[in-house]
Image: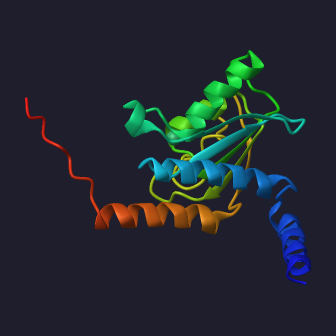
Amino acid sequence: MVRVAECVIMQLTHCLYGYLEHDYPMMARALAQARQAADMGEVPVGAVVVANDGTILAEASNNCIAAIDPSGHAEMRALRQAAQVVGNYRLPGVTVYVTLEPCPMCASLLVCARIDRLVFGASDPKGGGVVSRYRIGSDGLLNHRFSVTAGVRAEECGQLLQEFFRNRRQFPVVKKRDSG
Ligand SMILES: [Zn+2]
């Protein structure tokens, strides 16, 4: 009975917000990546890159801290992997799933990669590059635009980030001083 109700709600949501059938399971995979990032002490954001035939090309999570890389965002890493898999730095027809609205750097990368569609979970009112602060991806001044579906599993995606930052405030990482 619960499952039937869930299905009805999902169908209604698809109709209302333009979600596609596989948006939920793909976002679940992105969430799994985000949880892995949290376990490693990284900001919990995950991304999945899917070809237009449904093939998963790449999955990645944030690893800025471990890689000492300011560009180590989940979308950036997943797109680099996907380009290697396809053998092309352009990724037409591709859908990118990410748990958090991309920042301006990653939104610009999505334009460069010529992706077809972006699906994200939680919005980022402070730094979002797609709908919240900037509108990269629908800007007529740029040479490529992609469609955007926002808010897929937004609550779970946002909760993960909130929990992560709450824990970090409560238990800040004590930096070890270099004894040398
Ligand atoms: Zn980014």
Picture mark count: 0
Q: As displayed, is residue 77 above or below residue 135?
A: above
Q: Quadrant of the N terminus?
A: bottom right
Q: List x then y, in percent, for residue 66.
A: 40, 36
In the rendered structure, the answer to whether residue 150 lies left or right of residue 133 reads right
Residue drawn at the location 30% of the way across and 64% of the way down: 169
Percent coordinates x, y for residue 113 in the rendering:
67, 27
Looking at the rendered image, the quarter that the C terminus falls into is top left
Place of residue 145 in the rendered image (x, y in percent of width and height, measured from the top left):
72, 36
Q: Residue at x 53, y 62 (%)?
A: 160
Give the residue furthest to the bottom: 1
Q: Specify whether 92 is left or right of 71.
A: right
- Tell me residue 71's x, y (percent): 46, 32
Where residue 91 sits, quadrant-wise, is top right
Q: What's the colour scheme?
A: rainbow
Residue visible at 45% across and 47% down in the picture: 40
Judging depth in this view, the residue of 135 and 41 nearest the camera is 41
Furthest residue to the left?
Answer: 180
Q: Quadrant of residue 7?
A: bottom right
In the rendered image, is residue 101 in sight? no
